[in-house]
Structures are given as structure tokens and as C-alpha cells.
């Protein structure tokens, strides 16, 4: 039995023995809700009792920054340096969770207690993100237990505010580039492609939210007496939105799209199928850019979504033309999309289409980022996962949602590999969030394989060093 096989067997035993589930139960019992003031005490305790202890037990030096620079975010960094000649990995996780939604879970479940049913481990944070970072911490501990060393240098960063937008994470990273310097970034968050497919994703789409408001008059006027004489703001707003995105979900402004779908992205997505689970909605036919595959639409392209739309009182309408209508839209966008001056460009477009009475206001923008699928680290990770599972992983250039990947790619300059240990139906952020035992088991084996292989001689960074030394 090789060392790699031995460690993978130990990963299986770690699940079968119930050890991982016991650790998950303890972690979930801390109500680390970053959106609530009382969650701050639970976050501090989680850093003290769980993460600091685990990191120190692995021989890491631990540094901590509470409410760094006056923000609502705290940071914890564990560092284990074995040799400057070895590659260094930066790992990441977040200690905070969303609102527990007590009283809304099926069967009277308590969000702060892990309940087990038919291979589902229910509890707040099981999928997002405590279960996922505990998998990676368990893999590192198993590696140390079986070989007495990692074979690489480790830096593991935790934040306490991902669920509230990662306040000051970018600024923290920029101010601590030396402490966070590494050769590769490996982390786990977000979902796999589906429950059965090991997945690597390389970044995240960005998002730009904006308001459109047609405020035409302070009062409403009788629709019989004034119909045909007064411009209706709701009708006007609906037509204005139609010049941005049509009734079949196709973005109408080239300036809201990337220039092209890169060849490396198209190749990576060529074999990716969107297969909704039993609790997921079916993919709508005829929606979005039909020149793209479903996978390309969500993982390689932009979408413009209307998040809210209203005028007057929908519950109690009256026979009157409303004075104001408003909509909230969001552009989910990939790398290569220009968001500079977005508000001005939106307004210029509306003005040119005759809708100067509709005012655009951008409210939030968060960046897109992704690692090129042709980067050698992607092939390395894919080979490792294939050897562990017998299945080639799906390679997603970026997930459809959002994560602070740009901090690690753009600010720290790292190749970013996300290996998720969850799936789209996990109900994160909702009542009944859960982790699947099957994914926890396979995820722990995948993480053990990746970290074992990182400690071997053949990794991209060492090949690059050898090439540079002989240049």
C-alpha cells in the first residue's frame, strides 16, 4: 500500500468512525452570524476554541486581527513553514454564517444542532462554510499524522465577514502581502457542478446592481380621466428595461457584455452539462443567448436580471396612473467586461432611446476574476482528483455566483483553485442547509490527495523554478 493509498483509506475511516461528524456538530453549535451584533461573541469563541486550536495542533503559528482597521471583519492566519525550498499554499475559509432562521427548519430542526437524515447533515454552516473548511483542515491533519510533515508550506486564512460582503478583506490582503505570499491558492466554498461530479472552479462572476427610476409626478391620477394624456411610468420603465435585456433574457447592449468567449473557457466548458437535481427548477428552453450552451451562459457569459419591479400597490390597486415606478437590476458579469463608468453608460443609452425620464443609479459593484483554464496548476489539480476518484473533474472557469476570488488572484497574484465540497441543492442561506455525507467522504479524499500531491516534487511551481535556474 502506497502512502497516498494509506492516507485515502484513513480519510474514509475518518468519516466512518464518526470523527468528522462530531467535529462538525461542535463547529455548527457556535451561532456565528456575522449579520447580527450577538454573532460577534460566537465568532470570537469559534476563532479561539476551534480554529486556533486546530491550527496550533498542526504546528502553525497563529496571528489574529480582531475588527481589523475598525471594520466589522476579523482575520485569523495560521502559518506552518517547513522550508523555503518547498512550495507554499494559501488556503482560505470563512467562520461566519448567515441568519440561522430559527423556527423555519423542517421537522423542528435546530439550525445550531446537526441532525442526520438519509445521508444529509442538516445545520447552519454545514455547507457554507464550516463543513467545507473542516474537510480541508482534516485532510491536512491526516497528512501530518501519516508522514510527520506536509511537504509544503501552509498558510491558512480565515475571515469573519464573508456573508456580509467580506468588508476590508481586499485592504487587509494588500496590507499583508508578505504574510499571505504563496505559490498557489486552494480553498473550498460554493457548490460543485452537481452532487456527483468532482469540480474545480477557477474564479467567480462579478456583480453590478443598479436602480432604474421613472419618477414622473408626485401623485397618481385617475386612469379614466387622464389615460392617454399622461405618460405611465410603469409602462415607460418596462419599455426602458426592454432596451437593456429583451423578453427572452438576451442582453441588448454590447457594452454590457465581454468582447468574446475565450477559447480556453469554451474548451473547459465543452463537456459540462447542467443537470438540475430533484429539488432544482428545470432549465428554461429559449431563454438567454441560444448561440451559447447552458454551461457557457452561466459559467462563461453575462446575464442581466430584473431582481425587483414595481409601481403603486400591487395588493390593493386603484384606478389611477401611478406617479413613480422603480426597478432593481443586476448584471452578473465575467472577466473581460468593462464596468468603468457603468452608470453614465446606462444613462446615455436610456437617453438615446428616448427614455431620459428614467434615471439610472449604480448601487454596488463587485469584481469578476478567474484563472485561465490553460494554467498548468489546473491540469495538476485535475490529474490529482482524477487519480483519487477515478473521475475527471468538471473544470468551471468561474462559478455563476460570487466569492472574493479577486482578492487572491488580482491583489495577491495567485493561481486560484476552488475545490468545493457542496452541491447546488445544499440550501445554503436558507432553512434546511445541509452537507451530504457522500460529498464529505469524497471531498476529504480529494483534499487528502491534493495535499499529498502538493508535497511531492512534481508541481508547477517547482518546475518553473527549475526552468528559471537553468535559463
Image: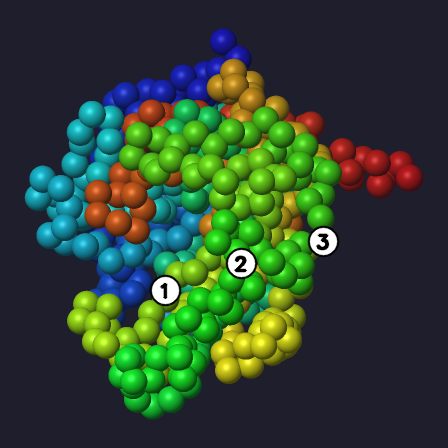
Residue in the picture at 64% in, 56% down: 257
Residue denoted by label 1: 308
Whether tag 2 and tag 1 are in contact, CB under 8 A, the answer is no
- Furthest residue in direction right, as rendered: 471
Look at the numbered discs 3 and 2 and tell me whether their residues touch, using CB distance below 8 Å: no
In this figure, which residue is indicated by the disc labeled 3?
259
Sequence order check, earlier mark of 1 and 3: 3
What residue lies at 30% left-to-right and 51% top-to-bottom?
429
User: What is the C-alpha distance between the residues marked 2 and 1?
Assistant: 14 Å
Label 1: which secondary element: strand
> Which residue is the extreme one toward the left?
108
Q: CA distance from mark 3 to mark 2?
A: 17 Å
Q: Position of residue 401 (x, y in %)?
A: 47, 50
* SS state under label 2: loop
- Is residue 458 at least partly visible in the picture? yes
CA separation in Å, label 1 and label 3: 28 Å
- x, y (%) of residue 65? 43, 66
Give the foreground label among 2 and 1: 2
The residue positioned 28% from the left and 76% from the top of the image is: 312
Q: Is residue 86 above or below residue 195?
A: below
Residue 440 vertical placement versus 231 (above, below):
above
Badge 3 local density, few (<14 within 10 Å), some, or many (20+)?
few
Foreground residue, 447 or 271?
Answer: 271
Amino acid at each position: 500500500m502506497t502512502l497516498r493509498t494509506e492516507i485515502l483509506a484513513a480519510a474514509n475511516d475518518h468519516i466512518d468512525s464518526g470523527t468528522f461528524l462530531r467535529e462538525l456538530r461542535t463547529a455548527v453549535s457556535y451561532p456565528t452570524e456575522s449579520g447580527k451584533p450577538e454573532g460577534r461573541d460566537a465568532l470570537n469563541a469559534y476563532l479561539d476554541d476551534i480554529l486556533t486550536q486546530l491550527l496550533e495542533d498542526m504546528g502553525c503559528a497563529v496571528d489574529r486581527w480582531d475588527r481589523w482597521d475598525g471594520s466589522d471583519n476579523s482575520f485569523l492566519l495560521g502559518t506552518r513553514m517547513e522550508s523555503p525550498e518547498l512550495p507554499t499554499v494559501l488556503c482560505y475559509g470563512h467562520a461566519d454564517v448567515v441568519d440561522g432562521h430559527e423556527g423555519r427548519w423542517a421537522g423542528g430542526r435546530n439550525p445550531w444542532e446537526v441532525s442526520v437524515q438519509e445521508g444529509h447533515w442538516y445545520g447552519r454552516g454545514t455547507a457554507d462554510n464550516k463543513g467545507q473548511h473542516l474537510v480541508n483542515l482534516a485532510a491536512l491533519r491526516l497528512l501530518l499524522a501519516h508522514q510527520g510533515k506536509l511537504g509544503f508550506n501552509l498558510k491558512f486564512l480565515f475571515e469573519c465577514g464573508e456573508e456580509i460582503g467580506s468588508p476590508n478583506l481586499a485592504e487587509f490582503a494588500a496590507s499583508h502581502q508578505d504574510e499571505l505570499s504563496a505559490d498557489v491558492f486552494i480553498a473550498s466554498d460554493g457548490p460543485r457542478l452537481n452532487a456527483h461530479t468532482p469540480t474545480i472552479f477557477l474564479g467567480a462572476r462579478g456583480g453590478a446592481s443598479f436602480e432604474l427610476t421613472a419618477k414622473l409626478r408626485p401623485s397618481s391620477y385617475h386612469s379614466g380621466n387622464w389615460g392617454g394624456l399622461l405618460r405611465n411610468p410603469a409602462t415607460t420603465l418596462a419599455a426602458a428595461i426592454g432596451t437593456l435585456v429583451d423578453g427572452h433574457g438576451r442582453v441588448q447592449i454590447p457594452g454590457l457584455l465581454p468582447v468574446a468567449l475565450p477559447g480556453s473557457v469554451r474548451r473547459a466548458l465543452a463537456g459540462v452539462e447542467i443537470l438540475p437535481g430533484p429539488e432544482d427548477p428545470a432549465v428554461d428552453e429559449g431563454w438567454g443567448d441560444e448561440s451559447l450552451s447552458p454551461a457557457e451562459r452561466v459559467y462563461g457569459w453575462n446575464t442581466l436580471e430584473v431582481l425587483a419591479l414595481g409601481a403603486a400597490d400591487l395588493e390593493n390597486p386603484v384606478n389611477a396612473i401611478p406617479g413613480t415606478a422603480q426597478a432593481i437590476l443586476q448584471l452578473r458579469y465575467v472577466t473581460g467586461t468593462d464596468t468603468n463608468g457603468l452608470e453614465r453608460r446606462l444613462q446615455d443609452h436610456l437617453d438615446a432611446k428616448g427614455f431620459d425620464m428614467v434615471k439610472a443609479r449604480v448601487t454596488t459593484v463587485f469584481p469578476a476574476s478567474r484563472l485561465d483554464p490553460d494554467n498548468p496548476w489546473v491540469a495538476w489539480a485535475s490529474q490529482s482528483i482524477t487519480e483519487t476518484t477515478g473521475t475527471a473533474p468538471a473544470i468551471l472557469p468561474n462559478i455563476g455566483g460570487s466569492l472574493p476570488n479577486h482578492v487572491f488572484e488580482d491583489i495577491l497574484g495567485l493561481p486560484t483553485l476552488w475545490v468545493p465540497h457542496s452541491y447546488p441543492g445544499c440550501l445554503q442561506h436558507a432553512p434546511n442547509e445541509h452537507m451530504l455525507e457522500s460529498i464529505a467522504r469524497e471531498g476529504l479524499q480529494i483534499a487528502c490527495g491534493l495535499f499529498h500531491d502538493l508535497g511531492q516534487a512534481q508541481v508547477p511551481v517547482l518546475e518553473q523554478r527549475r526552468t528559471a535556474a537553468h535559463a
